[in-house]
Image (tube, grey):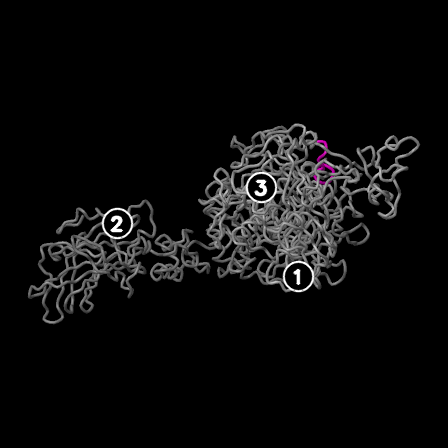
Amino acid sequence: MRRNFGTWKHIRVRQVGLSALAATATLLGTSAAQAQIDCNSNGTGVEGNITIEGGQVNMAGATLFVDFFRQPSSTNDWIDVDNDGFFGFVNPDPTFMFTDQLSTAYAPASPLNTWWAFNYRSVGSVNGFSEFIDSQLCGTLTYEPPSEAGIFNRFEYALNGITTITGINSTGTPLEQCSIDGAFLDVPGKWAVVAGGTPKWNRNPTAPGYGLNFLESSTGNVSQLQELSRDCSVETLNFDTANPDENTLFDYVAAWVPVTAISNRGTGIENIKFSELQYLFATGRMPTGENIIAVTRDVGSGTHNAFMNSINVDPSWGRGDNIGDKTDNSQTDLVGPIHQPSNKGGSSRVEGTVQNTRLGLGYTGLAGGSRSARDAFRGFYEVVNTCKDVDANGDPLCDCAVDGYVRPNIDTTLDNCDACTGYQIAGSGSFVVRGNIDANRDLGDPNFSTNGPPVANQAVADYLNNIFDSVAVFEGDVFGGECQTPAGDSVLDSLSCSAAVCSNDNNVTCTNDSDCGAGNSCDVLDCTTNADCLGASGVCSEVRTCSSNNDCESGEFCGQIVNSPGQGLAVSFFLGNAIDCVHDLTSPLDYNPSTLNQPLQDYTRANNGLGWGGDTPAYGSITVAGLVPSRLVVSGMPYSDGQSAPYIYWNGASYVTIAAGSDISARNRVAGDFNEDFARDINDATEMVNAYYAPRAWQQTAAAIGAGATGDMAADNAIPEVLGDFDADGHFSKEDLRYFADGLAMSGGSLNRKAGAIAIDARIAALAQDYPWADTNGLLISAPAAPFGEPVHAVPASIANYLGNTGNAYKNGDFRGDIAGASLEVQGRRPNAGGKPAGWDGKIDAADIDYVCAQSQYDWSNIDEAVFMDLSADMDGDLDVDADDVTELVEVILVTNFGDANLDGAIDAADLAIVDNTIDNDPTGCNANQNCGWADGDFTCDGVVDGTDRTLAGGTGGDDLQFISVVSTGNHNANGSFLGGDLDIPMDAADGAAVADHTEPRQFAASGNLSIRVDFAEAIASGSVVSNPALGSLTATANGNSLDITFDAPANGTCYTFDITGTQATGGTTIGAGSADADFCVCYFEGDINFDASVDLLDRGVIALPANLFNTMDVAGVTGPQVDLNRDGSIDLLDRGVIALPANLFADWSASTCP
C-alpha cells in the first residue's frame, strides 16, 4: 500500500541545531583544549568541516536497539522533512534511485554535508534515560565514551567503551553533543522510574517500592532505578500526559522487543521455567540450590528491565550473582583473573560473558544483527526455551502440552497471546522526550496536537515524526533487494553498475529491452570504478541485486533493500501492531490483545529475518558442545595448564592445543561432568579430584576419553580446565573444588553441600594429599615446569588449627563450615549470596557461626525470604538454613557445645566471664544494638546476651532473667516514695530521729546469691535480719554506714518480708527493734516479668529506659531524681529498674503486707 498524502504538504522553515539561525551552518574544527563542549564545533582532532542544515538529534539509551540506528532506513525521509520533494515513494527525479537520506553517512577526516547530525549513545536504556534527565534538568552531559557503541550518522565512533578515532574528544564523537534530547528504552519510560514505598523483589512498575532494592553487591554497589528529579534543579519531570506541562515526558512506543534467555552449552540447560529464572536472578541460585552463574546487565539496562519485568522480578532486584560494580570492560567477559559475570554495561558484554562462562546463563535481545538468534546461529551460545509457570492459577507448573516450553522465534513472537505457544518475554521499545512531538507538527498536519508543549528541538520532533508516520502506514511496501548469505552479508559479485540503462541512451534506466525501443537493449554495464557507470547507471558495485530468492544462488536469499524507517523496524525488529498481544503496562505478566494489523503481521512473518536473515536455530543444532572459552592473556602469567590462551587435550597419541572459539568435542558438553554421564552431580566428585591433582594423566584415562563427535578437535577428549573451571578464573584450582561442593553437588535433584564436601575430602584423603582448606592462597597451583606437564601443587598450610582453639581434628567435609571471616571487611572477599564462595578465611570460628545464624532466619523454599539469604550457610545438606545448621556447625564440625564462647572445646569459667562481661559492662555495645555474636556470648542467634546464654555457659539462670522488686512497707517511709528499685527506709535511732536511708537491689552472678544494702545515718557495728518465709543463708554484715543483707536466690514468684535490727558502732544503740511491721518486702521474678509474652532484654532488671525517665517519674505524688541504680558510676540505660512492669502490678500492695 502507498501512502495517501491527500493535499497536505509538509512545509517547514529550516532550523540549524538548537540555535535561531535560519541558514546553513558550517562547523569548523576546534582546539584540543576545550573547557567544555562547544555545541557548534567538530570534535577536536577531526579534519574537515561538518555542515548541518536541519539540526542535531542527540539521543542515548538501549544497547539492544543500537542496530536500528546503524540502518540507513532509520533516517530515510518519509514525510519530506527537508522540503526537497524527495520523500517516501514520491520521486520527481527519475535518475534518483531510492529514498532521500537525511543523515548522510560520516567518514572520518572527510567533509560532511547533512540535514541531520544524528548521535546515539548506546549505554543501556535506563542509563541513557539518566543521561537524558541530567541533560534536561541540569544541562550536564557525560564525557565518557558510550559503553556499548557510539553512532554518529551511522559511523561507529565508540565500541565497548573505547573510541575508534584517535585524537578525538573525550566522548569519541566527531561532533560534540549540545544536549541529550531524548532516550530510547527497551521498555516504557515508567518502567525505568522508582516508586516510593516498601521494596519487594517482585514489585510491578509504578507500584509502591518499585525499583528500590537495597541489597549491596560484593563491592557495595546498590542497584536502583531512576528518580525524575535532580539535586541541581527545582524542577521534577513527570509522565502525566493527561495534564501535561513543560516538564512532562512523552513515551512513544516504536517496536516490540523480545528478549531471550541464553546459556552456555556447558550449563546443560535447554529448558527453564519462569520460577527458576526468578530464583536464579533474584538469589543467584536455582531453586534446587544449584549455583549456575547468573550473568546480568546493570540495573540501567532496558534489556535487563524488560527481561526482569517479564518474569515478574523488580529489575532492581534482578541482581544474579551480584558481583562488582557496573563494568564496560570487554576483558571481564573473558575467562581469567578479572572475569565478572554481573552488572555488565552492554548487551554484548552479557553475550560475551555467556559465551566464555561454561556455567553462564544470561539474557539478550532476540532480534538484531548482533543479538541472540544470529549469535546462536554462529554457535556462540544457545537460546533457551522458557515455560511461563508463574501464571494466574498460582501453581508452579507448566500447564501446557510439551510442558509449555516455548522457543523464541518469529512465529512465537508474533502469535504470543497463549503462553503455552507464544513467547512472552519482551519490552515495548520506546522513545522518551520532553514535550509532545505532535505539537511540533505543521498546523495542516492531521496529527497536529495541542496537548502539551512542543519538543524544544524541532529536529528531534521531525526525526521522531518521520519514524512514526512511516510506522503508522507500513504494511509491506518494498522494492528491490540484495543477495545475501545466511549470515546476513551481501554477496560479492563481478563488478557492475548498480542500474541497467538502455543501450541507445545511458540516461534512461530500464528493467527489460522493451523499455528501450526497437533495436535497443537493456544493459547492465560492467565496471571497474564509478567513473565507468555512465548517465543513470549508478555506481560501480559488487553487490548482486535481486527481487526474489530465485535471482540468487543456492544457499543465498534475497534480502530486500530496506526503504522506510517503518520497514526497517518490521524486518529487523517487530512493530507493535504486528504482534497479537502486548503486556499490561503496570502488570507485565498479563497480556492483552493489541491493535493488530494483519497485513503487517503477514509481511513480518514472511520477511522478518531477526536482523540477520534467518530464524532462531534449534537448541544444540550448531555446535557439538559449545565453543572453547577465551582466556584473558596476561603477560607473564600462564594458567594452571601452562597455557596463556589455548587449552590442552589428548588426541590419542600426544597432547595438543585447541584455540579459543573452536568447536569443542562432545565429552566436554556439560561443565562438571567428570564421570562421562552427561550430567553434573555429586557422582562427579571422585573423578574431578583425580583430574585436579593430575589433569594430564587423567586425560588418558577411560573417564576422559569419549566416543562422540569431535567438533574442531582431533579426538573426543575431556579438557579438565574447561570442565572444571567453575569460577571462570582460567585455572582449575582448589577453589573450583570448593565451588562444586558449595553449589554443584546435586543429589536426588537438590544440592547437598554436606555430602559434596565429604565426597571431595574423601577422595583427597584416598589420594594421600594434604587438605588444602587452611591455606589462604586461592590457587595453591601453578603452571607445570615443562610443556604439557602436570601443574605444580604447593604444600598447603597445616589443617591442624582449622577448627580454631577447639583442639579437635579435621574431619572430611568440615571445610563446608568456612564461609565467612576477617575477609568480611575486604571488598571482593566477603560472602556474597549467589556468587562464587569467596568469604572463607582458612579457619572455622565464631565469624562462621555468626554468619550461619544470620542466614537461619530465612526459608529457602519461600522466595520472599530466599532473596535475603545465602544458601552457602546450609551445613547439614538439606537445602535450608535453620537452627539445625547452627547445631551442625557447632556440634558436628567444631565438635563443641553451645556455651563455648571462646571455642576452646570446653564450657568453663572463661566462657561465663565472657557472657557476664557482655551483660554487665556493655551499656552501649552489642546488647544495646542487639547485634551480639558468638564471641560475645550470644549462643541463641538473637543478637543479645541474656540469661539463656548464661545458662548455656554454665551459670545458674543468668543475670538477665533475675529481677528484684523492693517495696517499702509499714510507716517507715511517710511519703511512700519508690524510686525505680531503690527504697527509702528511715531507720529510727535511739533518740527517735528519722533518717532517710535506702536499699539497693544487687545481683551476685557467680554465686547465685542476692544482696540488698541498707544504709543508715551512722556507722553500724552489727545487725540482724529475719525473713518470712525463711530464706537460706540469710546474713547481715555491717559495712560502714550500711548493712549488707545476703541470701540464697529465692523462689520464683515469691514475696518475702524482712525485719532488720542494727547496732550503732558508737553507743551500741539498737536501731529498728520492736517494729510492729516488716521493714521492707522483696519479690523475686524470673522470666517474662514485663508480661509482653517473651523473655528478652525488656525483662532485665536494670536496662533499656532513657536516663532522664526518672526526672519525670511520679509515684504517689512524689517526683524521683535520677539514680545510679546499678552503682557503676554513671546514670545511663543500665539503671533501669522496674519501670517496664505494668502500672497496676503493685496496686494491691499495702503499707503492712506484701502482694
In-front residue for pair 936/299: 299
Query: In the figure, residue 187 lies in which quadrant?
Result: top right
- State the CA–CA distance, disc 1 to disc 2: 79 Å
Confirm whether residue 554 shows in the render.
Answer: yes
User: Please, what is the three-letter code of the amino acid marked with disc 1?
Assistant: Thr
- Check disc 3 and report its element: helix, strand or loop: helix
Tell me the crowding category of disc 1: few under 14, some 14 to 19, or many 20 or more residues within 10 angstroms, Cα based. Answer: some
Confirm whether residue 874 shows in the render.
Answer: no
Q: Earlier in the sequence, mark 3 or mark 1?
A: 1
Task: Identify the main secondary structure in magenta.
Answer: loop
Query: In the figure, residue 309 lies in which quadrant?
Result: top right
For disc 2, the marked residue is 1141
Q: x and y percent of residue 963 in the render?
A: 27, 54
Disc 1 and disc 2 in contact, CB within 8 angstroms:
no
For disc 3, the marked residue is 440
Q: x and y percent of residue 616 in the render?
A: 70, 37
- Check disc 2 and report its element: helix, strand or loop: loop
Q: x and y percent of residue 921 in the render?
A: 35, 62
Q: Of all residues shown, which one is farthest toward the right?
A: 519
Q: Quadrant of the N terminus?
A: top right
- State the CA–CA distance, disc 3 to disc 1: 33 Å
Disc 3 and disc 2 in contact, CB within 8 angstroms:
no
Instruction: Point out the stretch of residues depicted in magenta.
Output: 605-618
- Mark seen at residue 427: none
Query: In the figure, residue 998 lies in which quadrant?
Result: bottom left
For disc 1, the marked residue is 30
**Is residue 617 covered in magenta?**
yes
Q: Earlier in the sequence, mark 3 or mark 2?
A: 3
In-front residue for pair 338/464: 464
In-front residue for pair 717/9: 9
Q: x and y percent of residue 390 in the render?
A: 55, 35
> Left or right: where does residue 373 sit relative to residue 130?
right
